[in-house]
Amino acid sequence: KAGVTQTPRYLIKTRGQQVTLSCSPISGHRSVSWYQQTPGQGLQFLFEYFSETQRNKGNFPGRFSGRQFSNSRSEMNVSTLELGDSALYLCASSRDLGGGEKLFFGSGTQLSVL
Amino acid sequence: GQQLNQSPQSMFIQEGEDVSMNCTSSSIFNTWLWYKQDPGEGPVLLIALYKAGELTSNGRLTAQFGITRKDSFLNISASIPSDVGIYFCAGLNTGTASKLTFGTGTRLQVTL
């Protein structure tokens, strides 16, 4: 059974640009969550999607957005990139909404903003 | 954003030694989780704890859910080289879906 797949694996952008990251959950999983990992702030929850609807949101500015498609695949978008957005962005999936203890994480997308 | 306090921040141990680390929070959680993250990978769940005072084992790993619901402990017995990595605790409350609050992490290095 394939795990959570995130693309691309690495990304380099410059300040002011926007970026879109993609996540394919484990087959049969309908909930997708996104986390940001940085050396300073650690792992921080961004948002969770289920049935194409955002169900929960962390404390991030509106520049961070996401969406989920009917096949449960999810994308997150960061607009007007700032240097501080450099981070490892992790996607996690679970079978159902609220399956926090049953999350499976992908390997992440390492974003560098120059 | 909030992070849970983990200690120690890092540790060097010899193969075969036992390891202990803990995690504290200023707020209560209904569920405590322990994850391990290897370089270049996402966190992998090691142990989940659901009840205050609960002691749960998974092979050489043993974790406890603190009575106050504000802390948790993880012990690794007879460490081996593949135990190297970063260990994170995480707290979860009912109703917050998959919004985990993670700890600051403990980096474990094992020497032969």
Image (cartoon, grey):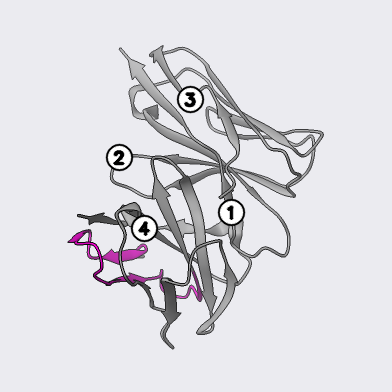
Residue wearing tag 2: B39
Name the disc covering residue B9, or none: 3
Q: At label 3, which amino acid type do we have?
A: Gln
**Front residue (pair A54, A113):** A113
Q: SS for tag 2?
A: loop
Outermost residue on the bottom side: it is A70
Percent of width and height locating residue A57: 57, 68
Q: What chain letter is assigned to the residue under label 4?
A: A
Q: Mark 2 lies on which chain?
A: B
First to last magenta residue range: A3-32
Residue type at mark 1: give it.
Leu
Instruction: Answer with left or right where residue A30 lies relative to residue A77.
Output: right
**Label 3: which secondary element:** loop
The residue lying at 40 percent from left, 28 percent from top is B83
Distance CA(mark 3)–CA(mark 2):
17 Å
What chain letter is assigned to the residue under label 1?
A: B
x and y, in percent, of residue B3 in the image: 57, 42
The kind of residue tagged 2 is Pro
Chain-order first, disc 2 or disc 1? 2
The C terminus of chain B sits in image quarter: top left
Q: Which residue is drawn at 74% across and 37% down?
A: B70
The image quarter in which residue B27 lies? top right
- Relative to B7, residue A107 above or below: below
How many marks overall?
4
| Element type at mark 4 | strand
Task: Give me the C-alpha separation between circle 4 and circle 1.
Answer: 15 Å
Between marks 3 and 2 in the image, the one whose residue lies nearer the viewer: 3
Compute the Cα span from label 3 to label 4: 22 Å
From mark 1 to mark 3, how far is it between C-alphas? Answer: 20 Å
Q: Residue A89 carries which label?
A: 4
Circle 3 crowding by C-alpha within 10 Å: few under 14, some 14–19, many from 20: some
Residue denoted by label 1: B100
